[in-house]
């Protein structure tokens, strides 16, 4: 079973038991977190696509760590002008372990054929 969730302006394909890094979320290590913006849910046989989100679907998990990514150097340079600037940036992130994917929509039943009156 997998789902596609939206958080932090990005979309992620997640499965149960997976650990992923998302944009910084409020909370401390060990706190529960839930994602209600579920775009797609698949249980292996049935695929439910939201418009824009799947109704009553929820992905729950827990915060594993709050940290910063590796440093990215930003270097600005203009030739022949004696202009150089060096800045560093570390983007904060939250590492989340996905515990459960709850699909709110039941699979669509096949439409019944109209019965002929005798």
Image (cartoon, rainbow, N blue to C red):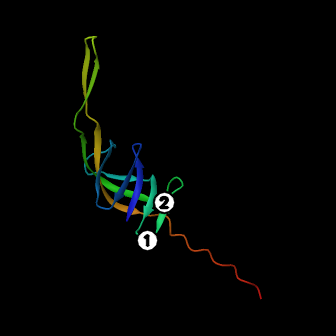
**Residue in view at x 47 percent, y 65 percent:** 47
Relative height, residue 38 to residue 78 (above, below) = below
Label 1 SS: loop
Q: Would residue 95 be found to the left or right of residue 110 on screen? A: left
Mark 2 Cα shell of 10 Å, populated few (<14), some (14-19), many (≥20): few
Q: Would residue 85 be found to the left or right of residue 1 on screen? A: left
| Residue 50: x %, y % from top left | 51, 57
Q: Nearer the viewer, residue 67 or 26?
A: 67
Please give the residue where the numbered disc 2 appears in the rendered image.
56
| Residue 39: x %, y % from top left | 46, 55
Task: Name which of mark 1 and mark 2 comes first in the sequence.
Answer: 1
**Residue in view at x 29 percent, y 45 percent:** 94
Assign the C terminus to one quadrant of the image: bottom right
Q: Which mark is residue 11?
A: none
| Residue 68: x %, y % from top left | 24, 38
Name which quarter of the figure residue 60 lies in.
bottom left
**Residue in view at x 27 percent, y 11 percent:** 80
Relative height, residue 35 to residue 115 (above, below) = above
Most extreme residue toward the bottom is 118
Please give the residue where the numbered disc 1 appears in the rendered image.
45
Q: Would residue 77 be found to the left or right of residue 101 on screen? A: left
Most extreme residue toward the left is 70
| Residue 19: x %, y % from top left | 27, 54
Q: Nearer the viewer, residue 30 or 66?
A: 66
Label 2 SS: loop
Mark 1 Cα shell of 10 Å, populated few (<14), some (14-19), many (≥20): few
Relative height, residue 43 to residue 55 (above, below) = below
Relative height, residue 60 to residue 72 (above, below) = below
Front position among marks 1 and 2: 1
Name which quarter of the figure residue 112 lies in.
bottom right
């Amino acid at each position: 079973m997998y789902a596609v969730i939206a958080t932090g302006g990005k979309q992620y394909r997640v499965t149960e038991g997976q650990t992923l890094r998302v944009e910084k979320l409020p909370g401390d290590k060990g706190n529960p977190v839930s994602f209600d913006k579920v775009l797609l849910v698949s249980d292996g046989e049935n695929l439910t696509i939201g418009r824009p989100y799947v109704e009553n679907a929820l992905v729950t998990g827990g915060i594993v760590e709050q940290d910063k990514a590796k440093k990215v150097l930003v270097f600005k340079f203009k030739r022949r002008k004696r202009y150089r600037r060096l800045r560093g940036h570390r983007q904060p992130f939250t590492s989340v372990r996905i515990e459960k994917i709850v699909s709110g929509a039941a699979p669509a039943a096949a439409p019944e054929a109209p019965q002929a009156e005798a």
